Image: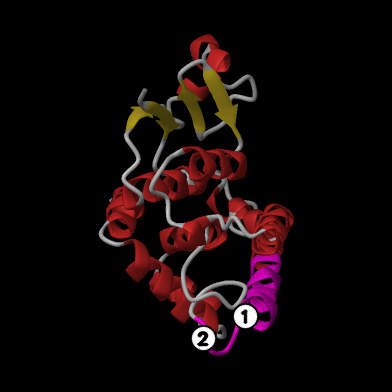
Amino acid sequence: MKLKVYADRLSQPVRAVIIFCEVNGIDYEEIKVDLANREHLTPEFAEINPMQQLPAIVHGSFKLFESHAILIYIASSFPGVADHWYPADVYKRSKIHSVLDWHHSNLRRGPTPVFRSPLNPEAVAEGEKILSAALSKTESFWLDDNRPFLLGQNQPSIADLFLVCDIMQVKLVGETDWNRLLGPYKKVQQWIENTRNATNPHFDELHKVLKELKEKLQN
């Protein structure tokens, strides 16, 4: 049975889920839910996800929401997913969970105020403060000097994908702000490139939507 992924590619966790499915050859159907047109707030979508957020999946009679839970389910349920994404080793797996839990209360909160309309300067400043603190912690703690991915690993996990997709949202504010915010964090910049290279061409394909939206906003 084919996995159904309810998605709007402007959502960072949606991009992470779809990139993962593409990289791992998951048989899935992308069902578009337009956030801008508030399609996630319809009664029909509430039947899929009562929280009315994206992403959400349906696999047979099984429904699931919350992006971390979704990728854990896919990585654990579908054959052929490489172990490094969500290792069988309980110690490695627990370390990935620690990153994911940290992600939601730290890095995930940083970019959000920057993209709200109308912009609130105080909220933007606070968002940048949270983002910078999270990037600093990623640089100094989660990344190893000699290894390309989080937790000193040689291959990416689902944690790498979630965090990098969140950071990529900063591209919407332009290269000047991207360089200002990311410039001090050389290891973070290299890690983003490592994750991109490990998941291309799917990474670039899924992030085209950011360039398209940026151009639309500028016109």
Label 1 Cα crowd, 10 Å radius (few <14 / some 14-19 / many 20+)? many
At mark 2, the secondary structure is helix
Left or right of residue 76: residue 2: left
- The kind of residue tagged 2 is Lys
For mark 2, does the 10 Å Cα neighbourhood hold few (<14), some (14 to 19), or many (20 or more) residues?
Answer: few
Q: Position of residue 183 (x, y in %)?
A: 51, 83
The vertical placement of 41 against 64, above or below, is above
Q: Is residue 218 visible?
A: no
Q: Return the residue at label 1.
A: 139
Pick the residue in front: 11 or 79.
79
**Residue type pointed to by label 1:** Glu
Where's residue 84, x and y in %? 50, 62
In the picture, measured across the screen, residue 133 lies left or right of residue 207, that is right
Instruction: Count up the numbered dots.
Output: 2
Figure quadrant of residue 135: bottom right
Q: Is residue 65 left or right of residue 14?
A: right
Q: Which secondary structure dominates the residues rendered in magenta?
A: helix
Contact check, label 2 and label 1, Cβ < 8 Å: yes
Instruction: Indicate whether residue 36 is drawn in magenta.
Output: no
Q: Magenta part of the protein: which range?
A: 129-147
Q: Which residue is at a point 41% across and 42% down the rendered structure image?
A: 79
Q: Compare residues 93 and 49 and report the one nearer the observer.
A: 93
| Residue labelled with disc 2 | 186
